[in-house]
Amino acid sequence: MLWDWLHVLVLPLAVTVTPLWLRHRDRLGRKRHLLLGTFVAAFGIVVVLGYALDLHWTGFPGNTLWDWLELLVLPLAVGLLPVWLEVSNSVRTVHVVAGAVALALVAVAVVGGYGYSWKWTGFAGNTLFDWLQLFVAPLVLPIVLIPAVGAWMAVAESDGVSG
């Protein structure tokens, strides 16, 4: 099933593509951005059709928002790391608004999942520990670990240049 393949490939793909993206993002032209956007849109269509038409070969029917979060949070954190590094130095109003909208959507899903028993969220039964497991590594990576390693590398580089 496609769902099983996603579990196998998404994180390694994000780990492999991110260094390439960091190194060559200046050379990515409009054509490659269009290709990436087309791929993302096509995948989105497959996901919607997988649920809407109950396409069992996708493995999507029966999976909840929680399942998708478990699948995608860490790979997205790794894959969007270059964007995080660029944006963190120059946060604009659009970034704050996008973050606020994302947080509001998550809050609605959490309230609906726990308070109104929305089955599609898959949140019922998950504890604080489950949420910590889901988000600690993806948040620690870009917010704590990467800046610490970057600062350490900058000090090591300056020591190597001056010494």
Image: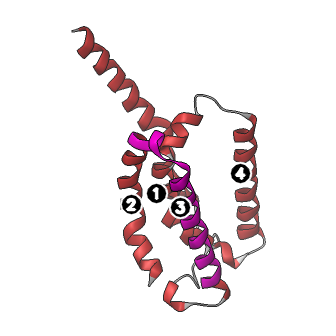
Q: Give amino acid for label 1.
A: Pro
Check disc 3 and give the amino acid type: Leu
Residue underneath mark 3: 35
Q: Are marks 1 and 3 in contact (CB under 8 Å)?
A: no
Q: Nearer the viewer, mark 2 or mark 3?
A: 3
Residue with the mark numbered 1:
75
Between circles 1 and 3, the one closer to the viewer is 3
Q: Is residue 38 magenta?
A: yes
Residue 138 in the image: above or below residue 61: above
Left or right, 77 with respect to 95, comes to: left
Disc 4 designates what residue? 103
| Residue 125 in sight here | no
Residue lying farthest to the top in this orientation: 162
Q: Give the magenta part as a residue range.
A: 23-50
User: In the rendered structure, are the residues bearing label 2 and label 1 in contact, judged by CB atoms less than 8 Å apart?
Assistant: yes
The numbered mark at residue 13 is 2
